[in-house]
Amino acid sequence: ARLRLLQAQVEPHFLFNTLANVRALVETGSPQAAPVLRSLIAYLRAAMPRLQGDATTLSDELSLVRAYLELMHLRMPDRLDFFVDLPPELGSLRFPPMALLTLVENAVRHGIDPSEEGGRIEVGGERVNDQVRLWVSDTGVGMTQAMGSGTGLRNLRERLTLFYGLGAALALTENRPHGLRAELTFTPATR
């Protein structure tokens, strides 16, 4: 029940902002309206089933992440570049819904959006022995003093502990020359 409560705390601002942007594009007759709407539909298709379950696969989560990043790229085409690459063998792992998406949303909102130049987001992962490492790395504005103490990251840490146990970790480190790398480390769930 606690996991479901934490899942329900997905920020609604993203959906409302995107719908407002679609409306503005339609009203102005912009040719971007159709691609943005297609990406929004893809995102919603990927997101809605995950809100109901306790777990999905990492492959499902990546579909959601890609759809979200496509939408953000359409919103700021000259300011956001992204790359998503995970080994195929990690795709079938059970994974808490929207956990990786939380890190990607933070990279856009706190890293790329505030940067005048924009930046690049990379999502990757690997398996090392019994541990899985997933990361979201951005070239945005970097760490702030409050970084890591927000509600979203606190909830994510709690969700990871509920899902994978006390061995799960979320670490934030600075990228050089600027940006942030958020890294999840966990032992895959077998249940």
Image: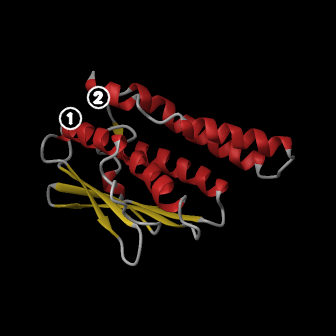
| Residue in the picture at 50% in, 55% down | 108
- Is 56 positioned to the left or the right of 80 in the image? left
Residue 190, quarter of picture: top left
The colour mode here is: secondary structure
The residue at 37%/27% (across/down) is 53
Q: Where is residue 147 in the image (x, y as percent from the top left)?
A: 34, 55
Disc 1 target residue: 162
* Residue type for callout 2: Leu
Disc with the residue nearer the chain's start (2 vs 1): 2
- Quadrant for the N terminus, please: top left
User: Picture coordinates of residue 146 (x, y %)?
Assistant: 34, 54
Which three-letter amino acid code belongs to the residue tagged 1?
Answer: Leu
Front-lying residue, 115 or 135: 115
The number of discs equals 2
Disc 2/disc 1 C-alpha distance (Å): 7 Å
On the rendered structure, is 16 left or right of 12?
Answer: right
Q: Position of residue 175 (x, y in %)?
A: 36, 71
Give the residue at x 43% y 29%: 51
Dot 2 falls on a residue whose secondary structure is helix
- Residue labelled with disc 2: 3
Query: Which numbered tag is attached to residue 46?
Result: none
Q: In this view, does 129 lie above or below 148?
A: below
Find the residue positioned furthest to the bottom.
177
Residue 32 percent location from the top left of the image: 77, 52
Q: In this view, does 91 lie to the left or right of 40?
A: left
Residue 190 in sight: yes
Q: Does residue 166 sit above or below 9 in this rendering?
A: below
| Rendered image quadrant of residue 15 | top right
